[in-house]
Image: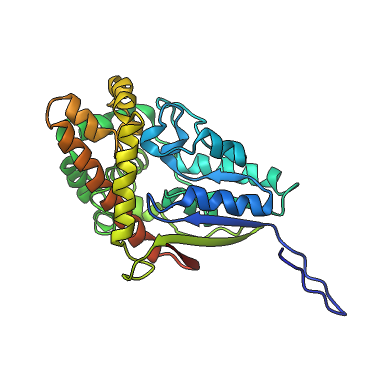
Amino acid sequence: MYLCSLSAVKMSVKKNKLIVIEGPTGVGKTAYAIEVAKGFRTDIISADSRQFYKELNIGVARPSEEELAEVKHHFIAHIGIQDYYSVSKFETDVLALLENLFQTHETVVMVGGSGLYVNAVCQGIDDLPDPDEQLREDIQKLYETQGIEALRAQLKILDPVFYNQIDLANHKRLRRALEVCLQTGKPYSELRTNTKKVRNFDIERIALNRDNGVGARHASPLLYDRINARVDAMIQNGLIDEAKNLYPFKHLNALNTVGYKELFEHFDQKISLEQAITDIKTHSRRYAKRQLTWLRAQEGILWKTLY
């Protein structure tokens, strides 16, 4: 329990607390978060943007029915793959939910590997305009027909400052930056204030990792072994059939994610099934490494090593 300090002249008011469980893919966030939530007898908010979609299950490692029954989860399978959902909408929705949950719970747990969504809740994001749907479709079509290089080239012209700051391999952030530039007529970098918003609750951020001698903040062979084993389990549990059912929607942004796009390439006869599975493992490991790099740049995070 978190105790209020009491003195002869003043009693401090205990704030509600949001405990955020972060870490790379495959590290074991779900099981850890469930144990923490059970300890506080509270709910879990998912900040994993891939688990938002009803149609995605095996490929996004959605918590099992047994796990969902242990602790009440929010923002799991709550939208469809064709629905529009943004980081700013997530921030608004979570803050509204927290206001309600804190009326009956002193502590709430949030878990996820989508750093942008976690930071939206913990720090807030800039108030940028929602994209025009036609503009979004045009930029998506540009990406599909001319690839990520076309996005980079256009952003370099419209906003060279942000071009030099952004992860040029992140097509989603490239597209969003272009949407803002084209819709507002201003560089995206000018509209980003990065002003941290004040929350009326305390926040404790815990980053998990698996370590066998390389240091708690770096990717380890143990983590990579877990990722490889999880991919094998996904295949055994029916990921190929799940991807086949989703193949008609492969053009959607929700499906442009590790675990599905590699199998779509196999269905298109571009690569073998064996190569697709190998690519899923490789891309998952690279994603985990990027997540750890991002987490190391965040302030105020407590690192916890799992074995």
Q: Nearer the viewer, residue 43 or 122?
A: 43
Which residue is painted at 69% across and 45% down in the image? 101
Report whether 33 appears left or right of 80. Answer: right
Q: Nearer the viewer, residue 257 or 209?
A: 209
Report whether 22 appears left or right of 215. Answer: right
Whole-percent x and y of residue 189? 35, 55
Q: Residue furthest right?
A: 8
Q: Quadrant of residue 223?
A: bottom left
Which residue is painted at 52% across and 61% down in the image? 205
Question: How many dots with numbers?
Answer: 0
Q: Quadrant of residue 219?
A: bottom left
Whole-percent x and y of residue 295? 40, 61
Which residue is painted at 75% across and 68% down in the image? 3
- Picture quarter with the N terminus: bottom right
Which residue is painted at 33% across and 20% down in the image? 245
| Residue 11 appears in the rendering | yes
Whole-percent x and y of residue 229? 31, 46
Report whether 290 appears left or right of 54. Answer: left
Please, is residue 56 above or below residue 107 in the view? above
Please, is residue 55 above or below residue 98 in the view? above
Report whether 4 appears left or right of 76. Answer: right
- Picture quarter with the C terminus: bottom left
Whole-percent x and y of residue 214? 31, 70
